[in-house]
């Protein structure tokens, strides 16, 4: 594999050489192409607006919304794990559910009952605990530690970090656990950049875009591990989606477009659904072409084993 394929190839950690392995996992995971990253940003932006819609606009609060969305994540994950091949709707529904759950999990960890976190006209954050109030630095430190712990367990288990070679239930469970924590961490980073850093929504988005550009440049540096680039990019696209979601929903006085969580979520859902439908059509065509290909006969020269 060429180093330039680090972010745009399915195997983000290199080729395995194991016969049949890549073909079997291709049925469960999408190709990590430019379209993948576009859909990832769309899903995470929708996760931000939808999470805020349930927790703040509908006034369910961070606690109830987190519990409900975690259940949704568990259900969508079971569907994905039970699927025998890659299905864009199954896969991206799990990504979306981790983004929504990550939004409210991050808010519940980092925020408190202060009026600055309440939507207009609200007097509370809903039933249950109002938020742990850990703050963005402490919340991010906890999430980074948790993500590193998942990777440590992953490594100690002896299972590969190569996405193409993830074939076991335990491997997929670790993969999706890392996805959930990384999306939650990305939410904390995005909220910190937008709300507390002084950069605002536009400045935060520009900073993250610049960091992603640096990752793109590092794609050509052989010494940088492929898997490290992938997971950093995966985390960073979450704050990009978070700042984009805040920019769409927040009042003009705070630097946003004031489109509201409901309107923004509806538009983003339509966009993501369209991308998922397009991916589904492409997957069916690819499967159809693969099914019609005849096996190439293997011949041996005389005198060779």
Image: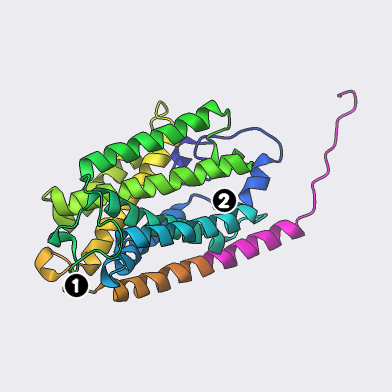
Q: Which residue is mark 2?
A: 29
Q: Is residue 290 visible?
A: yes
Q: Position of residue 275 (x, y in %)?
A: 47, 67
In which quadrant is the C terminus drawn? top right
Q: Secondary structure at mark 1?
A: loop
Magenta residues (range): 278-305
- Whether the residues at callouts 1 and 2 have beta carbons within 8 Å, the answer is no
Residue 68: image tag: none
For the residues carrying marks 1 and 2, which lies nearer the camera in this image?
A: 1
Residue in view at x 13 percent, y 64 percent: 255
Q: Is residue 219 visible?
A: no
Q: Residue furthest right?
A: 302
Q: Which residue is mark 1?
A: 258
> How far apart are the two marked residues, 1 and 2, measured between alpha carbons?
36 Å
287 drawn magenta: yes
Residue 275, compared with residue 297, is above or below; it is: below
Residue in view at x 18 percent, y 60 percent: 117
Residue in view at x 39 percent, y 29 percent: 224
> Is residue 202 rendered to the left or right of residue 156?
left
In which quadrant is the N terminus drawn? top right
Q: Position of residue 43 (x, y in %)?
A: 40, 61
């Amino acid at each position: 594999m060429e180093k330039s394929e680090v972010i745009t190839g399915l195997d983000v950690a290199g080729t395995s050489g194991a016969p049949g392995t890549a073909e079997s996992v291709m049925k469960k995971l999408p190709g990590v192409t430019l379209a993948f990253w576009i859909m990832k940003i769309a899903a995470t932006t929708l996760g931000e607006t939808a999470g805020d819609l349930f927790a703040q606009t509908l006034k369910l609060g961070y606690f109830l919304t987190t519990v409900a969305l975690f259940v949704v994540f568990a259900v969508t994950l079971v569907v994905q794990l039970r699927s025998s091949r890659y299905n864009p709707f199954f896969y991206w529904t799990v990504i979306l559910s981790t983004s929504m759950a990550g939004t409210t999990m991050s808010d519940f960890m980092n925020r408190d009952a202060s009026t600055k976190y309440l939507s207009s006209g609200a007097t509370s954050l809903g039933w249950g605990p109002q938020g742990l109030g850990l703050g963005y630095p402490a919340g991010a430190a906890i999430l980074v530690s948790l993500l590193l712990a998942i990777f440590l367990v992953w490594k100690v288990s002896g299972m590969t970090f190569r996405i193409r070679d993830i074939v076991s239930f335990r491997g997929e469970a670790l993969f999706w656990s890392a996805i959930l924590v990384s999306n939650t961490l990305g939410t904390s980073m995005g909220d910190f950049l937008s709300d507390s850093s002084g950069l605002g929504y536009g400045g935060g988005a520009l900073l993250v875009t610049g960091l992603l550009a640096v990752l793109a440049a590092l794609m050509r540096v052989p010494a940088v591990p492929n898997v490290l680039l992938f997971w950093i990019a995966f985390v960073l696209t979450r704050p990009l989606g978070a700042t984009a979601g805040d920019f769409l929903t927040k009042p003009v006085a705070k630097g946003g477009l004031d489109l509201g969580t409901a309107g923004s979520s509806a538009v983003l859902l339509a966009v993501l659904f369209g991308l998922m439908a397009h991916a589904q059509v492409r997957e069916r065509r690819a499967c159809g072409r693969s099914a019609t290909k005849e096996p190439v006969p293997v011949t041996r020269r005389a005198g060779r084993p």
